[in-house]
Image (cartoon, grey):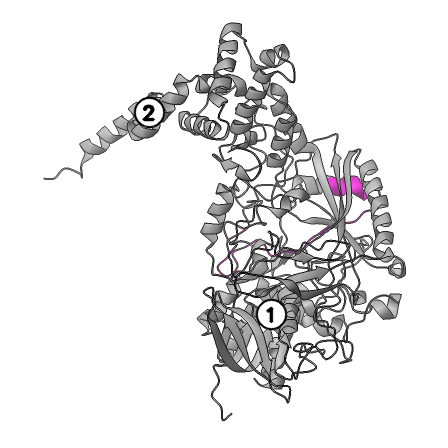
Amino acid sequence: MSQPNNPPRSLSRRRLLQGMAALSLTAACASLFPAQMAAAQQSEKSGFSVVSAFLVSRATSPILSQRYYAALNRHYPDFPARLAALAAYLDGQKFAHVDDFLQAVNEDDPLRHTATLIVGAWYTGVVGEGADIELIAYADAMMYLPTKGILIVPSYGIGPDSWGNQPVERLTEQGREA
Amino acid sequence: MSKQVDADVIIIGSGVMGGLVATQLAKAGKSVIILEAGPRIKRQDIVERFRNSPFKMSLTNMKLQGVGSPYPDLPHVPSTYGDYLQQSGPVKYPTKYLRVVGGTTWHFGSALWRMIPNDFRLNTLYGRGRDWPFGYDELEAWYGEAERELGVSGVDGQDESGQGGAACPPRSTPFPMKGLEPSYLFKRLSVLLGKGGYNPVMEPNGRATRPYGKRPVCAGNNNCNPVCPIAAKYDGSMHIDEAERHGARLLDNSVVYRIEADDSGKITGVWYKKPDGSQHHLTAKHFVLAAYGIESPKLLLMSTSERYPNGIANGSDQVGRNLMGHTGISMNVMMNEDVWPGQGPTELLVYLNNRDGAFRKDFPSYKIKVRNTVPTADYAASLIQKGVLGSKLDQELHRMSARSLNFAIDFETLPLAENRIVPSKMKKDAIGIPLPEIYYSVTDYWHAGKEQGLKDFDNFARLLNAEVSKIDTGYQDRQHIMGTTIMGDDPRQSVVDRNCQSHDHPNLFIAGTSVMPSASCMNPTLTGAALSLRLADYMLRTVKV
């Protein structure tokens, strides 16, 4: 045959990739990692993903969501009950933004403590206390987002002479393109 | 020689100093065995362990320095990040050295300074501490050699005495590589502090600014400590690799616990243990001890016998004594403008206005440096612990990262007989080797320096329009071990002579910063490296090993 090597196959693969990109990340994960998907569904069912996305004001990765949810359950046996209480409260209040929630609950409200636990996990990438702590994410920890584009995640430098000029704020404080 | 020996030279310790000596000797065709207590490590493993660890070491939060080392912690070579070092003095000396092939330079910030001429004549000029048996002139060419071997990048023509004057110290060769680009922070601080007469000095360092040997150019990974992920920064494993290419043999996981000498003083052999506790013996014509400032004297002191009741090389009773470091203080400030520490390498800008002068009669030489580590993790944890969430959390992370600075001072310390390391009589490691026990203290001289340093902190805060958030005068350790096998012309007062050769044993040599008779206020690695290269030359040309 004089045809070039397998053009239809590469085309179809490209199509597939395009199609996958068009799907939600959740769906993509489902096709690639069925087991993780099942667990991710658990964290979604519990309301963890929705509550998390509200508390951090960002879209949350389903895989990380599942892993944080599982870790929080491991380290804090009462976490499911606390999450349920927080989810129910948020569901009832219909806050537009996490800042409204923070206005509504005082410093020692148990709901706020639960929120701190969840935000702490997403931001620091670490769950647990003392010698028992466990790392879930490093470079994907959300604490790096507010300074993204200016400071690197240590050990992930962006190349020789990539510093020196006065940093220009290219991002909003939430780590999104301004 | 009639008796068959295992090698021309046995080197104990595979850090930068042992590696330099091994490379020179192996290149000259000598048979060399290097004994290393710890294991070989792979860079990618250390990088992965760092990234996966929930404990990240932090230079901005000294409390966290005790945890999170990604280097191995094994029963036969316990990590210095744990409770291996026993402290018995009024001031803690919690130094961190690495017991792995390649040694402590794996995690050093890579400052590679020369000392200045007056540092060699401290006693004559200022009535403090000790003089060296020779002056800067003797070491100058070796500094140049060491800079080429270690691949130093630096700024030619700087006044490293900190006075903003002509080039100092004198040098016969330029830096092998140009200096790194200063970050915005360094440029901005130079402007603001310059108004108060503070002269910025860019630190010569071991990060490549052009491809150097197998090293790529520094890519601003901001991770010099604990590990450079791309090997742009020099570490001792590079010379070990080179020594092995020239035929040196390295035995890892081989903990030397005894050095033997015959009645005439000649060193005849060494004993070492493997992790399984098995004991092995090796012989050589010459021996080089290069196990850094704690393990080297510990080994000498452990090697007692009827003939040598105080240990090997210890006729002077100076082994283990004169322990010096750069005991320091620090200040955290909040700027009122964004300056962004954490861009580029972890350190570069220092101030040396009080590096040298008549004041050294009254208070010690010191260096002020600004930390340039990405601070995000420290601030995130503390903000969340305080209950800061929502938009405020992002705003505060941004503000604190952009504006919080940490300045640290390293003071010169003096060689004091009472500051010493001895093998513990009480505690042993898993293979029965005594742990190091350290007695450390500081004098009024150090406190006088602290008072001066606090005045500079005050000036800094004023010149920077910054608010001081914290000052820590709690005797911070800077991990620069010196003095414990001190050099001198008088065999009653020193362990090695001017050639780093034992006064007591003609075929025993000591390489590294533990021979330094004065500490200056500067990171000692380059001085140790220059002395090691000079020692290798002496062994080859004069001793004819």
Identify the mark at residue A38; answer none if there is no mark.
2
Viewer-closest of B87 and B432: B432
**Residue B144 visible in the snapshot:** no
Q: Which residue does the numbered mark 1 point to in the structure image?
A: B290
Span colored in magenta: B189-217
At a point 52% along the width and 44% down the height, the residue shown is A155
Q: Nearer the viewer, residue A103 or B228?
A: A103
| Numbered label tally | 2
Q: Is residue A68 left or right of residue B257?
A: left
| Label 1 vs label 2, nearer the camera | 2
Residue B230 placed where, x, y %? 50, 51
Would you identify the image quadrant in which residue A27 lies? Answer: top left
Residue B71 position in % (x across, y down)? 52, 53
Q: Chain of mark 2?
A: A
Residue type, label 1: Ala
Residue positioned most to the bottom: B2
